[in-house]
Image (cartoon, helix red, strand yellow):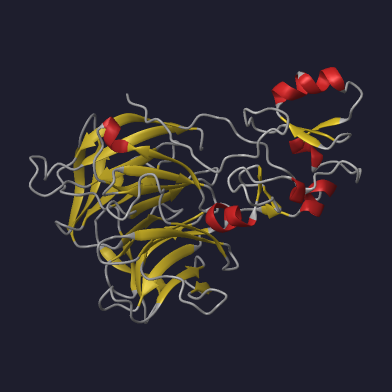
Protein backbone atom coordinates (compact mmCIF):
# COMPACT_ATOMS: atom_id res chain seq x y z
CA UNK A 1 0.00 0.00 0.00
CA UNK A 2 1.22 3.52 -0.66
CA UNK A 3 0.02 6.97 0.21
CA UNK A 4 0.75 10.18 -1.67
CA UNK A 5 1.36 13.23 0.42
CA UNK A 6 -0.77 16.22 -0.46
CA UNK A 7 0.53 19.68 -1.26
CA UNK A 8 -2.00 22.36 -0.45
CA UNK A 9 -1.01 25.90 -1.11
CA UNK A 10 -3.02 29.09 -1.39
CA UNK A 11 -3.07 32.71 -0.50
CA UNK A 12 -1.72 33.65 2.95
CA UNK A 13 -4.68 34.55 5.20
CA UNK A 14 -5.03 37.94 6.92
CA UNK A 15 -2.73 38.11 9.97
CA UNK A 16 -3.53 38.87 13.60
CA UNK A 17 -3.44 42.60 14.42
CA UNK A 18 -2.15 42.08 17.98
CA UNK A 19 0.87 39.82 17.58
CA UNK A 20 3.92 39.86 15.34
CA UNK A 21 3.64 36.19 14.37
CA UNK A 22 1.13 36.83 11.60
CA UNK A 23 -1.21 34.14 12.97
CA UNK A 24 -4.49 33.53 11.19
CA UNK A 25 -7.35 35.67 12.50
CA UNK A 26 -10.16 33.77 14.22
CA UNK A 27 -11.82 36.47 16.32
CA UNK A 28 -12.94 40.08 16.16
CA UNK A 29 -13.36 42.39 19.14
CA UNK A 30 -16.38 44.53 18.26
CA UNK A 31 -15.60 46.92 21.10
CA UNK A 32 -12.11 47.92 19.99
CA UNK A 33 -12.48 46.79 16.37
CA UNK A 34 -9.46 44.45 16.34
CA UNK A 35 -8.93 41.21 14.46
CA UNK A 36 -6.97 38.62 16.43
CA UNK A 37 -5.78 35.02 16.56
CA UNK A 38 -6.88 32.45 19.12
CA UNK A 39 -3.69 32.90 21.18
CA UNK A 40 -4.09 36.67 21.55
CA UNK A 41 -7.81 36.42 22.27
CA UNK A 42 -7.17 34.10 25.23
CA UNK A 43 -3.99 35.95 26.26
CA UNK A 44 -3.20 39.63 26.04
CA UNK A 45 -6.68 40.84 24.99
CA UNK A 46 -8.53 38.91 27.68
CA UNK A 47 -6.24 40.35 30.36
CA UNK A 48 -6.88 43.98 29.41
CA UNK A 49 -10.48 43.83 28.14
CA UNK A 50 -12.54 41.21 29.93
CA UNK A 51 -15.86 42.92 29.21
CA UNK A 52 -15.33 43.44 25.46
CA UNK A 53 -17.62 41.74 22.94
CA UNK A 54 -15.59 39.17 20.98
CA UNK A 55 -17.02 37.18 18.07
CA UNK A 56 -15.79 34.28 15.98
CA UNK A 57 -15.00 35.72 12.54
CA UNK A 58 -16.78 32.85 10.78
CA UNK A 59 -19.96 33.51 12.75
CA UNK A 60 -19.95 37.28 12.28
CA UNK A 61 -21.69 36.94 8.91
CA UNK A 62 -24.50 35.03 10.58
CA UNK A 63 -25.29 37.82 13.06
CA UNK A 64 -28.47 39.79 12.56
CA UNK A 65 -27.30 42.76 14.66
CA UNK A 66 -25.85 45.40 12.37
CA UNK A 67 -23.13 46.45 14.88
CA UNK A 68 -21.45 43.01 14.57
CA UNK A 69 -19.59 43.93 11.43
CA UNK A 70 -16.20 43.76 9.79
CA UNK A 71 -15.24 46.67 7.58
CA UNK A 72 -13.34 44.99 4.78
CA UNK A 73 -11.49 48.14 3.73
CA UNK A 74 -9.88 48.38 7.18
CA UNK A 75 -8.23 44.98 6.77
CA UNK A 76 -4.95 45.04 4.87
CA UNK A 77 -4.24 42.16 2.52
CA UNK A 78 -1.36 40.01 3.82
CA UNK A 79 -0.56 38.85 0.28
CA UNK A 80 -0.45 42.35 -1.27
CA UNK A 81 0.72 44.87 1.34
CA UNK A 82 -0.39 47.91 -0.65
CA UNK A 83 -3.97 46.65 -0.97
CA UNK A 84 -6.96 46.52 1.36
CA UNK A 85 -9.58 43.79 1.31
CA UNK A 86 -12.82 44.26 -0.58
CA UNK A 87 -14.61 40.86 -0.61
CA UNK A 88 -14.84 37.63 1.37
CA UNK A 89 -14.02 34.42 -0.56
CA UNK A 90 -16.42 31.78 0.70
CA UNK A 91 -14.62 29.13 -1.33
CA UNK A 92 -11.35 29.72 0.55
CA UNK A 93 -12.66 31.22 3.82
CA UNK A 94 -10.64 34.43 3.68
CA UNK A 95 -10.83 38.15 2.99
CA UNK A 96 -9.37 39.10 -0.38
CA UNK A 97 -8.24 42.22 -2.21
CA UNK A 98 -8.72 43.12 -5.92
CA UNK A 99 -5.34 41.64 -6.87
CA UNK A 100 -6.18 38.41 -5.07
CA UNK A 101 -9.43 38.12 -7.01
CA UNK A 102 -7.70 38.59 -10.34
CA UNK A 103 -4.80 36.24 -9.64
CA UNK A 104 -6.30 33.48 -7.50
CA UNK A 105 -9.99 33.79 -6.70
CA UNK A 106 -11.55 34.52 -10.09
CA UNK A 107 -14.61 32.28 -10.35
CA UNK A 108 -14.79 31.60 -6.60
CA UNK A 109 -17.86 32.34 -4.47
CA UNK A 110 -17.21 35.96 -3.48
CA UNK A 111 -19.33 37.72 -0.85
CA UNK A 112 -19.81 41.46 -0.47
CA UNK A 113 -19.34 43.20 2.88
CA UNK A 114 -23.02 43.98 3.41
CA UNK A 115 -24.17 40.42 2.73
CA UNK A 116 -21.35 39.02 4.84
CA UNK A 117 -22.20 41.15 7.87
CA UNK A 118 -25.96 40.76 7.62
CA UNK A 119 -25.79 36.99 7.41
CA UNK A 120 -27.43 36.75 3.99
CA UNK A 121 -25.13 33.90 3.06
CA UNK A 122 -24.16 30.63 4.69
CA UNK A 123 -20.45 30.77 5.43
CA UNK A 124 -18.55 27.55 4.85
CA UNK A 125 -16.31 26.44 7.71
CA UNK A 126 -12.80 25.48 6.71
CA UNK A 127 -12.38 21.74 6.26
CA UNK A 128 -9.26 20.33 7.85
CA UNK A 129 -9.68 16.71 6.80
CA UNK A 130 -6.63 15.02 5.40
CA UNK A 131 -6.77 14.02 1.76
CA UNK A 132 -5.34 10.58 1.01
CA UNK A 133 -5.23 8.11 -1.83
CA UNK A 134 -4.23 4.50 -1.41
CA UNK A 135 -3.33 1.97 -4.08
CA UNK A 136 -5.44 -1.06 -3.25
CA UNK A 137 -4.75 -3.22 -6.34
CA UNK A 138 -2.57 -3.24 -9.46
CA UNK A 139 -3.55 -5.12 -12.62
CA UNK A 140 -1.24 -5.91 -15.54
CA UNK A 141 -2.90 -5.83 -18.96
CA UNK A 142 -1.78 -6.87 -22.44
CA UNK A 143 -2.44 -3.38 -23.82
CA UNK A 144 0.16 -0.77 -24.72
CA UNK A 145 -1.86 2.09 -23.21
CA UNK A 146 -5.20 2.41 -21.45
CA UNK A 147 -6.60 5.61 -22.94
CA UNK A 148 -10.26 5.10 -22.01
CA UNK A 149 -12.04 3.01 -19.38
CA UNK A 150 -15.62 2.34 -18.24
CA UNK A 151 -16.68 0.19 -15.30
CA UNK A 152 -19.71 -2.10 -15.59
CA UNK A 153 -22.03 -2.86 -12.68
CA UNK A 154 -20.72 -6.44 -12.48
CA UNK A 155 -17.18 -5.17 -11.93
CA UNK A 156 -15.93 -5.94 -15.43
CA UNK A 157 -14.35 -3.15 -17.48
CA UNK A 158 -14.06 -1.85 -21.01
CA UNK A 159 -10.64 -0.46 -21.95
CA UNK A 160 -9.60 1.33 -25.13
CA UNK A 161 -6.05 1.37 -26.50
CA UNK A 162 -5.79 3.80 -29.41
CA UNK A 163 -2.19 2.88 -30.21
CA UNK A 164 -3.13 -0.71 -30.91
CA UNK A 165 -6.65 0.25 -32.13
CA UNK A 166 -8.14 -2.19 -29.67
CA UNK A 167 -11.16 -2.14 -27.37
CA UNK A 168 -11.27 -4.86 -24.71
CA UNK A 169 -13.95 -6.08 -22.34
CA UNK A 170 -12.07 -7.61 -19.39
CA UNK A 171 -12.53 -9.32 -16.04
CA UNK A 172 -10.32 -8.20 -13.18
CA UNK A 173 -8.45 -11.18 -11.79
CA UNK A 174 -5.99 -11.24 -8.85
CA UNK A 175 -3.30 -9.10 -10.47
CA UNK A 176 -4.13 -9.16 -14.18
CA UNK A 177 -6.97 -8.68 -16.63
CA UNK A 178 -8.64 -11.52 -18.50
CA UNK A 179 -10.06 -10.63 -21.91
CA UNK A 180 -13.73 -11.44 -22.47
CA UNK A 181 -14.15 -9.65 -25.81
CA UNK A 182 -11.67 -7.83 -28.04
CA UNK A 183 -12.74 -5.47 -30.84
CA UNK A 184 -10.38 -3.87 -33.35
CA UNK A 185 -11.43 -0.24 -33.36
CA UNK A 186 -10.32 3.21 -32.30
CA UNK A 187 -12.60 5.05 -29.90
CA UNK A 188 -12.55 8.72 -28.88
CA UNK A 189 -14.88 8.46 -25.89
CA UNK A 190 -16.64 5.86 -23.74
CA UNK A 191 -19.41 5.91 -21.13
CA UNK A 192 -21.65 3.47 -19.29
CA UNK A 193 -25.36 4.21 -19.29
CA UNK A 194 -27.64 3.73 -16.29
CA UNK A 195 -28.95 0.55 -17.95
CA UNK A 196 -25.36 -0.79 -18.02
CA UNK A 197 -24.91 -0.55 -21.78
CA UNK A 198 -21.72 0.91 -23.23
CA UNK A 199 -21.62 3.97 -25.49
CA UNK A 200 -18.53 4.78 -27.57
CA UNK A 201 -17.55 7.34 -30.18
CA UNK A 202 -15.74 5.95 -33.24
CA UNK A 203 -15.49 8.92 -35.60
CA UNK A 204 -19.00 9.17 -37.10
CA UNK A 205 -21.71 11.62 -36.11
CA UNK A 206 -23.61 9.08 -33.98
CA UNK A 207 -22.66 7.51 -30.70
CA UNK A 208 -22.28 3.76 -30.97
CA UNK A 209 -23.81 1.09 -28.74
CA UNK A 210 -21.88 -2.04 -27.79
CA UNK A 211 -23.70 -5.29 -27.14
CA UNK A 212 -21.86 -6.48 -24.03
CA UNK A 213 -22.69 -10.11 -24.81
CA UNK A 214 -21.77 -10.35 -28.51
CA UNK A 215 -19.45 -7.35 -28.83
CA UNK A 216 -21.50 -6.07 -31.80
CA UNK A 217 -21.37 -2.31 -32.38
CA UNK A 218 -24.49 -0.56 -33.68
CA UNK A 219 -25.71 3.03 -34.09
CA UNK A 220 -27.43 4.64 -31.12
CA UNK A 221 -30.16 7.29 -31.20
CA UNK A 222 -27.65 9.99 -30.14
CA UNK A 223 -26.62 11.95 -33.24
CA UNK A 224 -24.81 15.32 -33.25
CA UNK A 225 -24.77 15.64 -37.05
CA UNK A 226 -23.04 17.47 -38.73
CA UNK A 227 -20.59 17.43 -35.81
CA UNK A 228 -18.47 14.50 -34.67
CA UNK A 229 -18.54 13.41 -31.03
CA UNK A 230 -15.37 13.03 -28.95
CA UNK A 231 -15.66 12.67 -25.17
CA UNK A 232 -18.96 11.95 -23.43
CA UNK A 233 -20.55 11.42 -20.04
CA UNK A 234 -23.90 9.99 -18.88
CA UNK A 235 -25.51 11.65 -15.84
CA UNK A 236 -27.55 9.94 -13.12
CA UNK A 237 -30.73 11.37 -14.67
CA UNK A 238 -29.85 9.83 -18.07
CA UNK A 239 -28.70 12.97 -19.85
CA UNK A 240 -25.83 12.44 -22.28
CA UNK A 241 -23.15 15.14 -22.42
CA UNK A 242 -20.99 15.13 -25.54
CA UNK A 243 -17.89 17.07 -26.59
CA UNK A 244 -18.05 17.52 -30.36
CA UNK A 245 -16.27 19.21 -33.26
CA UNK A 246 -16.49 19.72 -37.02
CA UNK A 247 -13.76 17.19 -37.83
CA UNK A 248 -10.70 17.62 -40.05
CA UNK A 249 -7.46 18.73 -38.39
CA UNK A 250 -7.69 19.38 -34.68
CA UNK A 251 -5.20 22.27 -34.84
CA UNK A 252 -5.10 25.02 -35.83
CA UNK A 253 -8.70 25.42 -34.74
CA UNK A 254 -11.19 25.63 -37.58
CA UNK A 255 -14.91 25.02 -37.52
CA UNK A 256 -17.07 24.40 -34.49
CA UNK A 257 -16.10 23.09 -31.03
CA UNK A 258 -19.17 22.41 -28.90
CA UNK A 259 -20.50 20.60 -25.83
CA UNK A 260 -23.98 19.19 -26.43
CA UNK A 261 -26.45 17.90 -23.84
CA UNK A 262 -29.11 15.37 -24.91
CA UNK A 263 -31.95 13.68 -23.07
CA UNK A 264 -32.47 9.93 -22.82
CA UNK A 265 -34.28 9.86 -26.16
CA UNK A 266 -31.54 11.66 -28.07
CA UNK A 267 -33.23 15.07 -28.17
CA UNK A 268 -30.84 18.01 -27.86
CA UNK A 269 -31.46 20.02 -24.69
CA UNK A 270 -28.57 22.47 -24.59
CA UNK A 271 -25.53 23.53 -26.58
CA UNK A 272 -22.45 25.28 -25.21
CA UNK A 273 -20.21 26.95 -27.76
CA UNK A 274 -19.61 30.62 -26.91
CA UNK A 275 -19.09 32.66 -23.74
CA UNK A 276 -20.93 35.88 -22.87
CA UNK A 277 -18.60 37.83 -25.16
CA UNK A 278 -19.35 35.58 -28.16
CA UNK A 279 -15.88 34.05 -27.89
CA UNK A 280 -15.45 30.35 -28.65
CA UNK A 281 -15.34 28.40 -25.38
CA UNK A 282 -13.43 25.33 -26.56
CA UNK A 283 -10.56 24.41 -28.84
CA UNK A 284 -10.96 20.63 -28.52
CA UNK A 285 -13.37 19.30 -25.82
CA UNK A 286 -11.66 15.92 -25.46
CA UNK A 287 -13.20 14.74 -22.16
CA UNK A 288 -16.32 15.76 -20.29
CA UNK A 289 -17.89 15.10 -16.91
CA UNK A 290 -20.57 16.68 -14.72
CA UNK A 291 -21.13 17.40 -11.03
CA UNK A 292 -24.36 16.58 -9.21
CA UNK A 293 -25.38 20.25 -9.31
CA UNK A 294 -25.03 20.34 -13.09
CA UNK A 295 -21.64 22.00 -13.52
CA UNK A 296 -19.98 20.87 -16.75
CA UNK A 297 -16.33 19.87 -16.47
CA UNK A 298 -14.39 19.83 -19.73
CA UNK A 299 -10.81 18.78 -20.50
CA UNK A 300 -10.03 21.16 -23.36
CA UNK A 301 -6.89 20.56 -25.43
CA UNK A 302 -5.03 23.66 -26.59
CA UNK A 303 -2.61 22.18 -29.10
CA UNK A 304 -1.50 18.97 -30.79
CA UNK A 305 1.10 18.38 -28.04
CA UNK A 306 -1.61 17.72 -25.48
CA UNK A 307 -1.36 20.96 -23.52
CA UNK A 308 -4.73 21.68 -22.02
CA UNK A 309 -6.96 23.29 -19.42
CA UNK A 310 -10.01 22.28 -17.43
CA UNK A 311 -13.05 24.50 -17.98
CA UNK A 312 -16.00 24.39 -15.56
CA UNK A 313 -19.31 25.84 -16.72
CA UNK A 314 -22.53 26.43 -14.81
CA UNK A 315 -25.69 24.83 -16.23
CA UNK A 316 -26.48 28.27 -17.66
CA UNK A 317 -23.16 28.43 -19.51
CA UNK A 318 -21.22 30.86 -17.30
CA UNK A 319 -17.53 30.08 -16.81
CA UNK A 320 -17.12 29.19 -13.12
CA UNK A 321 -13.44 28.40 -13.34
CA UNK A 322 -10.56 27.66 -15.70
CA UNK A 323 -7.79 25.47 -14.31
CA UNK A 324 -4.47 25.73 -16.12
CA UNK A 325 -2.38 23.59 -13.78
CA UNK A 326 -0.52 24.31 -10.55
CA UNK A 327 2.35 26.84 -10.76
CA UNK A 328 4.51 24.71 -8.45
CA UNK A 329 4.55 21.77 -10.84
CA UNK A 330 3.26 22.95 -14.22
CA UNK A 331 5.74 25.20 -16.01
CA UNK A 332 6.57 26.06 -19.60
CA UNK A 333 8.97 23.13 -19.54
CA UNK A 334 6.46 20.79 -17.87
CA UNK A 335 3.06 22.05 -19.02
CA UNK A 336 -0.29 20.82 -17.76
CA UNK A 337 -1.42 17.93 -19.98
CA UNK A 338 -4.81 16.80 -18.65
CA UNK A 339 -6.28 13.53 -19.91
CA UNK A 340 -8.74 11.64 -17.70
CA UNK A 341 -11.42 13.35 -15.62
CA UNK A 342 -14.01 12.16 -13.09
CA UNK A 343 -16.28 13.85 -10.56
CA UNK A 344 -16.66 12.24 -7.14
CA UNK A 345 -19.97 11.85 -5.23
CA UNK A 346 -19.11 15.01 -3.26
CA UNK A 347 -18.46 16.90 -6.52
CA UNK A 348 -14.69 17.07 -6.40
CA UNK A 349 -13.07 17.04 -9.84
CA UNK A 350 -10.15 14.63 -10.31
CA UNK A 351 -7.85 15.05 -13.32
CA UNK A 352 -4.78 13.15 -14.52
CA UNK A 353 -1.70 15.00 -15.79
CA UNK A 354 -0.03 12.38 -17.96
CA UNK A 355 3.44 13.74 -18.73
CA UNK A 356 4.05 15.04 -15.22
CA UNK A 357 2.69 11.89 -13.50
CA UNK A 358 0.31 13.98 -11.39
CA UNK A 359 -3.23 13.82 -10.08
CA UNK A 360 -5.04 17.14 -9.56
CA UNK A 361 -8.00 17.45 -7.15
CA UNK A 362 -10.28 20.44 -7.82
CA UNK A 363 -13.43 21.94 -6.34
CA UNK A 364 -16.73 21.77 -8.20
CA UNK A 365 -15.85 25.19 -9.68
CA UNK A 366 -12.41 24.18 -10.91
CA UNK A 367 -10.16 25.59 -8.15
CA UNK A 368 -7.20 23.58 -6.92
CA UNK A 369 -7.53 21.69 -3.64
CA UNK A 370 -4.34 19.68 -3.91
CA UNK A 371 -2.17 17.68 -6.28
CA UNK A 372 -0.31 14.39 -5.93
CA UNK A 373 3.00 13.32 -7.39
CA UNK A 374 2.17 9.77 -8.51
CA UNK A 375 5.78 9.19 -9.57
CA UNK A 376 6.67 9.03 -5.87
CA UNK A 377 4.51 5.94 -5.44
CA UNK A 378 5.69 4.28 -8.63
CA UNK A 379 2.96 5.32 -11.07
CA UNK A 380 3.97 6.63 -14.48
CA UNK A 381 1.84 7.91 -17.34
CA UNK A 382 -1.56 8.30 -15.60
CA UNK A 383 -4.16 8.72 -18.33
CA UNK A 384 -7.75 7.46 -17.99
CA UNK A 385 -10.04 7.58 -14.94
CA UNK A 386 -13.32 5.94 -13.97
CA UNK A 387 -15.32 5.58 -10.76
CA UNK A 388 -16.50 2.17 -9.57
CA UNK A 389 -19.84 1.37 -7.98
CA UNK A 390 -18.05 0.54 -4.71
CA UNK A 391 -16.62 4.01 -4.12
CA UNK A 392 -13.12 3.45 -5.48
CA UNK A 393 -11.66 4.80 -8.68
CA UNK A 394 -9.58 3.23 -11.43
CA UNK A 395 -6.68 4.74 -13.33
CA UNK A 396 -5.37 3.42 -16.63
CA UNK A 397 -1.78 4.26 -17.56
CA UNK A 398 0.29 4.56 -20.71
CA UNK A 399 3.73 3.12 -21.36
CA UNK A 400 6.60 5.02 -22.87
CA UNK A 401 7.64 3.56 -26.20
CA UNK A 402 10.82 1.52 -26.03
CA UNK A 403 10.45 0.47 -22.38
CA UNK A 404 10.51 -3.27 -21.49
CA UNK A 405 6.85 -3.24 -20.42
CA UNK A 406 5.48 -1.48 -23.50
CA UNK A 407 2.83 -4.19 -24.01
CA UNK A 408 1.86 -4.38 -20.33
CA UNK A 409 0.04 -1.19 -19.38
CA UNK A 410 -0.96 -0.99 -15.73
CA UNK A 411 -4.44 -0.49 -14.31
CA UNK A 412 -4.61 0.81 -10.73
CA UNK A 413 -7.46 0.65 -8.27
CA UNK A 414 -7.48 3.35 -5.59
CA UNK A 415 -9.22 3.97 -2.32
CA UNK A 416 -9.46 7.62 -1.35
CA UNK A 417 -10.58 9.79 1.53
CA UNK A 418 -10.86 13.48 2.28
CA UNK A 419 -12.49 14.36 -1.04
CA UNK A 420 -15.29 11.79 -1.29
- Visible residue check, residue 152: no
418 up-or-down from 284: above or below: above
Residue 94 visible from this viewpoint: yes
Given residues 248 and 206, the one toward you in this image is: 248
Does 56 sit above or below residue 214?
above
- Foreground residue, 37 or 223? 37
| Picture mark count | 0
Note whether 386 is above or below 302 in the view shown.
above
- The N terminus: image quadrant: top left
Q: Is residue 219 left or right of residue 281?
A: left
Percent of width and height locating residue 367 = 51, 50
Which of the 4 image quadrants contains residue 61? top right
Answer with left or right where residue 402 lies relative to residue 110: left
Q: Determine the residue positioned at 80% across, 47% down.
A: 71
Image location (x, y in percent) of residue 370: 46, 40
Which sits in the foreground, 412 or 351?
351
Q: Residue 409 sits in which quadrant?
A: top left
Is residue 145 shown left or right of residue 309?
Answer: left
| Percent coordinates x, y for residue 104 in the rendering | 54, 52
Q: Quadrant of residue 110?
A: bottom right
Residue nearer the viewer, 144 or 240: 144
Q: Is residue 76 above or below residue 231?
A: above
Q: Residue at x 11, y 40 (%)?
A: 405
- State the image coordinates of residue 307 (x, y, percent, origin top left): 31, 60
Residue at (58%, 67%) from the top-left corner? Answer: 318
Q: Residue at x 29, y 46 (%)?
A: 356
Amino acid sequence: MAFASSIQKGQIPVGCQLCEDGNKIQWKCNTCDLLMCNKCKDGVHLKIAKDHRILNIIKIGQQEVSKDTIIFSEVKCAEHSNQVCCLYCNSCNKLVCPKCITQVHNGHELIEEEDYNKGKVELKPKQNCEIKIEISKVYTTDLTSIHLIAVCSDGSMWMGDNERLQLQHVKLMENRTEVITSINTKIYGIAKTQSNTILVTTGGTKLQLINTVTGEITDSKYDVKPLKPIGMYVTSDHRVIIGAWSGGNAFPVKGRRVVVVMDQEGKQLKEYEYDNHKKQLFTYPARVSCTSNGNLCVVNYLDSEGRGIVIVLSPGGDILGTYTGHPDVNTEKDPFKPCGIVTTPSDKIVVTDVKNHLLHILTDQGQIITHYNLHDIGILGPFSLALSTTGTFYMGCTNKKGTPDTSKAKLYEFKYSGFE
